[in-house]
Image: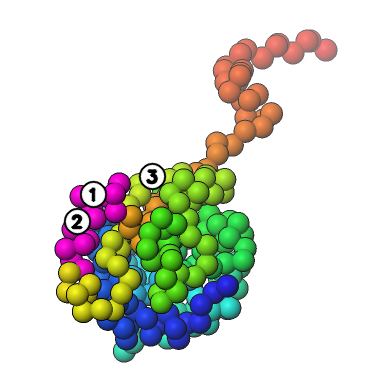
Amino acid sequence: MHLDVQDLRNFYYRSRLGRAAQKTIREALASFWPEAQGQTVAGFGFAVPFLRPYLADARRVVALMPGPQGVVGWPQGMPNVSVLCEETAWPLDTGRVDKLLVVHGLETSQHPALVLEECWRVLGPGGSALFVVPNRAGLWSRSDRTPFGYGRPYSQSQLETQLKAHHFLPERHATALYQPPSEKRFWRKTAGMWETLGTKVWPILSGGVLIVEASKRVHSPSGPGLRETVRKPLDVLKPKPEAKPV
């Protein structure tokens, strides 16, 4: 079940813990996508806290928010790019998106397979998608004080298996949010230390979220016509039989 958009906005923009999570995840995403010059960038779920870095140089930015979640206008003080849409029917042309970011959109969906089909449809050739989901082994998926404590957490192998089943090719992965999901002053003051430590000893400490980058896998066209063309490519050079005199 999708969380309410007001709860998501309050967490990321009005709570100390949410702002820390936003900063940490945004930095992790920047290591995958440092820029989006002239590209079309779309986010599904509640991806707006992480789309802002691409507003300046992207050709177009679209924030897709599913109906069960609700929508808020974004970005504040600028022309709105948020769209309320059906969870499995997005108002985007096929193959038009260069970069697709899915946050709080997959793990809370009742139809994850259909969501992935829609992700594949809108992504263009050579495009890439980033999926940010709660880590099954992390502390954040065990606490309902944050949005990552709701829905279906994943392990890396579970997420990558699901992506492969829907014609995505996982390319790179990372984890983030090693800091405990607590508002207590000590944990907030030492958040940076935990993130630095986590990236160095990640097999021991489990990050709160998984980030997987995947590309769109397109099969080569096949069929009798293509095989016939390849099998006899020089038939057109054979001499034609001479016409019989009448």
| Dot label at residue 201 | 1
Q: Is residue 11 above or below residue 57?
A: below
Q: Nearer the viewer, residue 227 or 5?
A: 5
Q: Nearer the viewer, residue 221 or 145?
A: 145
**Could one spot residue 178 in this view of the protein?**
yes
Sequence-first disc among 1 and 3: 3
Secondary structure beneath disc 1?
loop
Q: Residues within 10 Å of mark 1 (few under 14, many from 20)?
A: few
Q: Are marks 1 and 2 in contact (CB under 8 Å)?
A: yes
Q: Position of residue 197 (x, y in %)?
A: 19, 56
Sequence-first disc among 2 and 3: 3
Q: Is label 2 or label 3 in front? A: 2
Highlighted range, magenta = 191-205
Q: Position of residue 241 (x, y in %)?
A: 70, 11
Q: Residues within 10 Å of mark 3 (few under 14, many from 20)?
A: few
Q: Nearer the viewer, residue 187 or 134?
A: 187
| Dot label at residue 197 | 2
Q: Position of residue 86 (x, y in %)?
A: 60, 73
* The C terminus sits in image quarter: top right
Disc 3: which residue:
171
Q: CA distance from mark 1 to mark 3?
A: 22 Å
Q: CA distance from mark 2 to mark 3?
A: 24 Å
Q: Position of residue 212 (x, y in %)?
A: 39, 52
- Residue in the image at 38% along x and 85% along y: 10
Identity, as a three-letter code, of the amino acid under mark 2: Leu
Q: Are marks 1 and 3 in contact (CB under 8 Å)?
A: no
